[in-house]
Amino acid sequence: MFHKIDVLIIAVFLALSIFLIFKPYGYSSKKLLLVSDSDSLYIPYKDGSFNLFSKMKDVFGNEHSIYKSIEYEIKDGKVKVIHSDCANQICVNTPAISNCGESIICAPNRVAFIIDCSDRDILKQ
């Protein structure tokens, strides 16, 4: 036989589990992490075409020199590598990524793009 407190506890756990399963990751909670052989940084997640051959700014405004011959674009929240000078072009042929934890890796250039949706706020570091 269930008591009122048992029903209440079950209802709370059920509501919490449903919330965690369907927890929306908003566009603003996504962060784009760029990892290279020399550096790792969060880059702005905004629409446009970009290249890594020039100096680039991270989300904090700090300049970084990556100098890799890779061009990527962000369009409608999806990240896609559009050009690389590597031989196999695996990163270019990788479909666009948009979900948490997905990545595009260019092994010859030692570069990876990773969509990070962790709860920690990088702007408070």
Image (cartoon, helix red, strand yellow):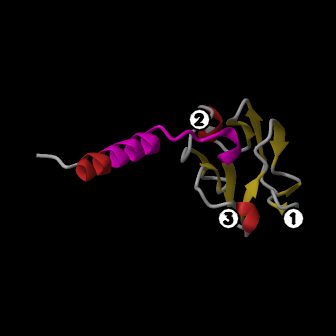
- Mark 1 and mark 2 lie on one chain; the one further toward the N terminus is 1
Magenta span: 11-30
Image location (x, y in percent) of residue 77: 70, 34
Image location (x, y in percent) of residue 100: 56, 44
| Residue ID for mark 3 | 37
Residue drawn at 58 percent across, 55 percent down: 118
Q: Are marks 1 and 2 in contact (CB under 8 Å)?
A: no
Residue drawn at 87 percent across, 64 percent down: 62
Tell me the SS state at disc 3.
Answer: loop
| Residue ID for mark 1 | 62
* Residue extending furthest toward the left: 1
* Residue 56 appears in the figure: yes
Q: Is residue 33 left or right of residue 44?
A: left
* In this view, 12 is above or below 67: above
Q: Nearer the viewer, residue 115 or 26?
A: 26
Tell me the SS state at disc 2.
Answer: loop
Count residues near mark 1 (Cα–Cα under 10 Å), then give few for <14, some for 14-19, many for 20+.
Answer: few
Q: Is residue 76 magenta?
A: no
Count residues near mark 2 (Cα–Cα under 10 Å), then give few for <14, some for 14-19, many for 20+.
Answer: some
Q: Amino acid at mark 3?
A: Asp
Compute the Cα span from label 2 to label 3. Answer: 20 Å
Image location (x, y in percent) of residue 112: 63, 52
Compute the Cα span from label 3 to label 1. Answer: 18 Å
Q: Amino acid at mark 2?
A: Thr
- Mark 2 and mark 3 lie on one chain; the one further toward the N terminus is 3
